[in-house]
Amino acid sequence: MRCSRASTACRPGGPWRCAARASRPATCCSRSSTPGSRARGSIPARGASGPAIPPAPWRPARSLEPAANTDAIPPHASAIFRASFGTPSTEPRKLENTARRIATASPWSTEDSADLYGVKAWGNGYFGVNEAGHVFVRPDQTDGREIDLHEVIRGLEARDLTTPVVVRFSDILRHRLKRLHDAFAAAIAENDYRGRYTAVFPIKVNQQRLVVEEVYGYGREFGFGLEVGSKPELLAVMALTEGESERIIVCNGFKDDSYIEAVVLATKLGRTIIPVVENFGELALILKHAKAYEVRPRIGVRVKLASEGAGRWRESSGEKSKFGLFVSEILELVRVLKEQGMEDCLQLVHCHPGSQLQDIRRVKDAVNELAHVYAELKLMGAGLRYIDVGGGLGVDYDGSRSNYASSMNYTLAEYASDVVYRIASVCNARGIEHPIIVSESGRAITAHHSVLVCNALGSSALDRFSISEQDARDLADGAGVPQPLRDLRDAYRSIADRRLVECYHDAVQAREQALQMFNLGYLSLEHRGLAERLYWSTCARIRDLCRRLPSVPEELESLETILSDIYFCNVSIFQSLPDSWAIDQLFPLMPIHRLDERPTRNAVLADITCDSDGKIDHFVSPRDTKRTLELHELRDDEPYYIAAFLVGAYQETLGDLHNLFGDTHVVHIKLHDEGGWWIEETVKGDTAAEVLRYMRYDVDRL
């Protein structure tokens, strides 16, 4: 269901700012350099009627060095502070802290934005930033053949296809398949390999019909096939592959009697279909239906490797893996087939070292072990023709080219070369024929081709809290002001480059004392609110000064995260980015426009569900995972678009209906042969009525 036009109301009394309509100006504390006193006090004893210590007289704070003070604080701030905290002014005004800035000394360019968001690192040549400050898509990595993503989104909105929307670039699918084919072709030539290579696309990675059809269609020139993991997936593929019996279909997953029967019948119809035995009981079902329908089926077997995988899916391989046969079971399988005179039917050996393998060493170990199993079985008389190395080919989500879970420390060319070399070496040493190499690289095929675009509905920021003129007068007079608030006032006034940590400690302690007094009934709600505003204003000023320092004290490093904004995005993370929530998968995120402007806010992203887990607070970075994302100030009556990239694998099929948010709109974009782009296909998102019907509600009665 479309999440657009969320009806969250503006709250005039809080730090919320709504981008959909004009709202009151955000205000916060002044950045002042005027020194002040730092009176210390204590919480009043239980039963006391007011502050335990009377207001302390003002006394000068330690002097500030002019150079540091002049560089850090604008000259006009001192006058504002004196007018507000010193001598009360007769004119009503609010003290406003300058909005957060990110190193504004030098001009900003689109190249700076590309570097900031790491587009060249994770974009893999498919994404970049153009001179207009917009993200562009280069589907076939050819200069001049580019699609302006912001232009696409505005064009879709003109057609009443509002964000959130998933934009699929069909030409990227074609290019990914070609790159996979070319990488193995080069490796085969380099290693004098006398077999060939084919890929099978596991449709579980993205089961959407349009995606599967495009992958199958684009893979036709390379002879690529499909992989299924259930009977429903098999039925979908059987309908799709009618008339192309030579292209391979690999059947994995748990197989009951009806699943096996469907596979055997497909074999009888002439399909090149291979059921992979993943637990020993499946062999008896295959033999039963083969005898009943008088078919000699092609049979595969999955090996439970001793070599373990790596990363989140390391248990996909190894002796504790869910699927696969131990070597002893494989030997028994061969014995049974020989007794039936069907050893020639065993045509494929398979392993699955895991998904998103970040370390190439795991690939080498798994392929080497599988190749030796293949060679031994071949010498035992099995009719093997295929060696299926499974999935695992990774995607560099963060662009770090490392063995981090969201990256990979190898290239596609290196992967193909290692697979071919290991298999060739074992076969050459044993003097056996080179098999057909099969891989199930679904993530690497589809991840890049889909982009999720949503709009920001509004933002919330702690550094937008403000102190009114009346607050300033009360603090200046001191009469009736509890000691913790006076300590917060003094901490705020005493901020300087050389005392940042000390002032932060004072503010933290004073805030804790204020909260304790409130919980004991000795602090009014109004005073608690004032303490809150003073504390966050103090933290914001300390953070702003830290940005000018060559190195930030360790205790203050967390202020950027603590004071980060929350940008509320018109999307459900549970529906559109489930891996971000479920397994902390990193996806590249960035605005798709205004990239010729310097971003001035650090933020985390929150969705519009009512679940506190519906947020993203880890972001890709060339050096390390960062806790905030650099974004621009929201403007009234102007949409602000944020995109998640590399979302084409698993996200659409794993998404759920949390809060009854259904599927978003989907569009397929293709390049024109003569330049430009066109919308090939649109799929409307779920309506509220459709989602309710799916959940068995009688919509007509609602």
Image: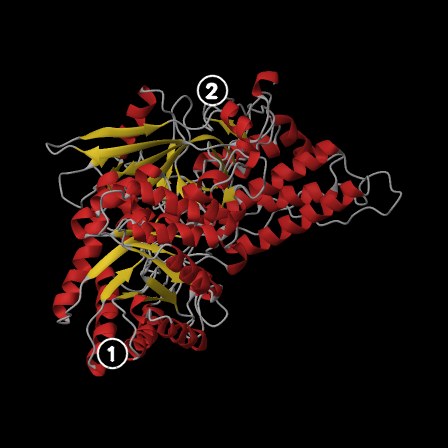
Say which residue appears at 38% left-offset and 26% top-offset: 684
Quadrant location, the C terminus: top right
Looking at the picture, which amino acid does disc 2 mark? Answer: Ala
Give SS at disc 2: loop
| Labelled disc at residue 558 | none
Residue tagged 1: 426
Amino acid tagged 1: Val
The location of residue 701, given as percent across then percent down, is 61, 17
Which label number is shown at residue 22?
A: 2
Of residues 380 and 69, which is closer to you in this image? Answer: 380
Q: Is residue 555 left or right of residue 339?
A: right
Secondary structure of the residue carrying tag 1 is helix
CA gap, disc 2 to disc 1? 70 Å
**Residue 217 visible from this viewpoint:** yes
First in sequence: mark 2 vs mark 1: 2
On the question of residue 26 being in view, the answer is no
Q: Is residue 194 above or below residue 65?
A: below
Contact? badges 2 and 1 (CB < 8 Å): no
Residue 263 x/y as whole percent: 37, 52
